[in-house]
Amino acid sequence: MHTMEKPVVWALLLCFVAVVNGVQTTDLGQNGASAGTTQPYRTAYHFQPLKNWMNDPNGPLYYKGVYHLFYQYNPYSAIWGNMTWGHSISNDLVNWVHLEHALNPIEPYELGGCFSGSITMLPGGRPVIFYTGADTNNFQSQNLAFPKDPSDPLLREWVKSPHNPVITAEDDIEPSDFRDPTTAWQAVDGTWQVLIGGKIDGRGMAYLYQSNDFINWTRSEKIFHSSVKTGMWECPDFYPVSINGKDGVDNYLEKGNTKFVLKASFLDHDHYILGYYKAERNGFQVEATDFMEANTDWRYDYGGKFYASKTFFDGGKKRRILWAWIMEADSRANDIKKGWSGLQSIPRVVWLSASGNQLMQWPVEEIESLRKDEVEIKDKELEKGSLVEVVGITAAQADVEISFELPNLEDAEQMEPSWTDPQLLCAQKNAAVEGRLGPFGLLVLASSNLTEETAIFFRVFKNHSRHIVLLCNDLSRSSLSRDVRKTTFGAFLDINPLQESISLRTLIDHSIVESFGGGGKACITARVYPVLAVDKEAKLFAFNKGSHNIKILKLNAWSMKEAKILPIMKRRKPPV
Ligand SMILES: *[C@@H]1O[C@H](CO)[C@@H](O)[C@H](O)[C@H]1NC(C)=O
Ligand SMILES: *[C@@H]1O[C@H](CO)[C@@H](O)[C@H](O)[C@H]1NC(C)=O
Ligand SMILES: *[C@@H]1O[C@H](CO)[C@@H](O)[C@H](O)[C@H]1NC(C)=O
Ligand SMILES: *[C@@H]1O[C@H](CO)[C@@H](O)[C@H](O)[C@H]1NC(C)=O
């Protein structure tokens, strides 16, 4: 069904482009990544506006065969401000057309900005935007906007509700910390439910509001969920996942085989917990551990740049897709100089792991359409202390999958009881520190003499008799520039190397490196700003600095083509 819709959508898009532009479109190439040294950090296949500041993804949606991405955008500069909802559409989540902004801050209740929010499908299939407006005193309220013409698959024009603001902060709520409504869902009796992020006395929480008509909302007396250990919850997200299988589940369907994910953005990361939920009890019941309560502190991504994410159910391919804002790790002055700041992650499919204790994530399959120039290495011994260059691809713009086999697992070093923090452990035992089983993995965005290198690597330890696999991303030598942050990140990977190979997939796109360990059990996204390893100067290596030989079972690497991201078309008079 999805494939049948495709030609229609493209015809629509092309027709739209032709009509609105009145002349032929110029494909600027997304990104100017090819513009070489003037913009070495511009990406080639990640979603970016043509210029200026972007942050949170808002209201992602699959509607009448078209993917929509809205996002926090400053039309005027490369720093945060004047927050507006940018709007882009796609047929495949890879190539995009930028449309007119969906929401501009013009009403009194939003003069301080149209902040983040979500889209809900009303019965009958009409979408509604639920978003936060901030007035000039930064008093935040919740507001609605409807498509002017719901029959338009491109949803180009949005009209704000005359009932706005529909939710304002009651006296006990801090009005400057009251934002980011989730997609709403219906209880069995039809009552609408929506969560809003907030904070009281440092305690982060999600408030639950209910409504019969989507306009008149009442706060539930019971706080939906909260935690003293978190601070303000931004961009809460709440959705079901299937207990068996990868299929996504629509926002709230009252049926058995699901668990629920509650995600909140705080302390620079997107954290999630798993649990069970029944609407009539207003109750979310945590299954195992709550936010920040154990070293099973689940995060979508263990880098420090993946934030304010949002998921949506893709009815076309029956999957749940996750988008997140990837922020810069350089200075504000650099952002102003390069004229832009912020990317969107490659959209990821999310599902529950077979063991049911965590989520899995994997880049949407559509991104593979950009692969070319495949290089394959199979069953290759990676001797201790060795480095193997992967040649034949554009290493600054690539997709790499690699898996390793370790013959001497019984020789793994014993963990010490104090090694509980994976990020700290990765910083102490960085890529330069030789070990027994590891470090081994990839060096990406590396200069030819390795003055610059970004290492993504594994170490395998034994904790009593159980093996522990550590995934690290060491940025300490990623750039000669002193002006950029070079934090090292790490995560424990919940796999048993006696039963499965140790695998890594890494997407490299000039200034971003997105890594997926163990088939998507732990992800680390990093921003990297090399000075030497730019464009054609960038190299890719596999390495092993452990004291044992290991084996590359399989390595597949591809150059990645540039995604087509057509600029917004200004209305022009056709030539006479
Ligand atoms: C917001 O927009 C106004 C123009 O409408 C501009 O003067 C101002 O500099 C902008 N602020 C930011 C932070 O971009
Ligand atoms: C809004 O809903 C509440 C609770 O259902 C009800 O008590 C109140 O009368 C409603 N207000 C309006 C204006 O409809
Ligand atoms: C590596 O190459 C860079 C650029 O050519 C050079 O500046 C640097 O001195 C070299 N470093 C080493 C250790 O050879
Ligand atoms: C190692 O084992 C100890 C004792 O069983 C446990 O408390 C600790 O969490 C384990 N470490 C890791 C990283 O799993």
Image: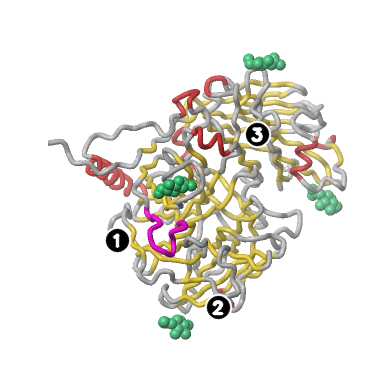
Residue beneath the point at 35% across and 64% down:
126
Can you identify the residue that label 3 sits on?
Answer: 403
Q: Which span is picked out in magenta?
A: 102-113
Label 2 neighbour load within 10 Å: few <14, some 14-19, many 20+: few
x then y, percent, for residue 156: 32, 53
The residue under label 3 is which amino acid type? Ser
Distance between the alpha carbons at the discs numbered 2 and 3: 47 Å
Q: Height in image: 61 above or below 466? A: below
Task: Identify the mark nearer the N-term, 2 or 3.
Answer: 2
x then y, percent, for residue 543: 70, 26
Can you identify the residue that label 1 sits on?
Answer: 148
Can you identify the residue that label 2 sits on?
Answer: 280
Residue 438 appears left or right of 43: right
Secondary structure, mark 1, is loop
Residue situated in front as seen by the camera: 332 or 271: 332
**Prevailing secondary structure of the magenta residues:** loop
Residue situated in front as seen by the camera: 54 or 334: 334
Residue 111 belongs to the span the image colors magenta: yes
Q: Height in image: 445 above or below 284? A: above
The residue under label 2 is which amino acid type? Glu
x then y, percent, for residue 395: 55, 25
Task: Identify the mark nearer the N-term, 3 or 1.
Answer: 1
Q: Quadrant of the C terminus?
A: top left
Distance between the alpha carbons at the discs numbered 3 and 1: 50 Å
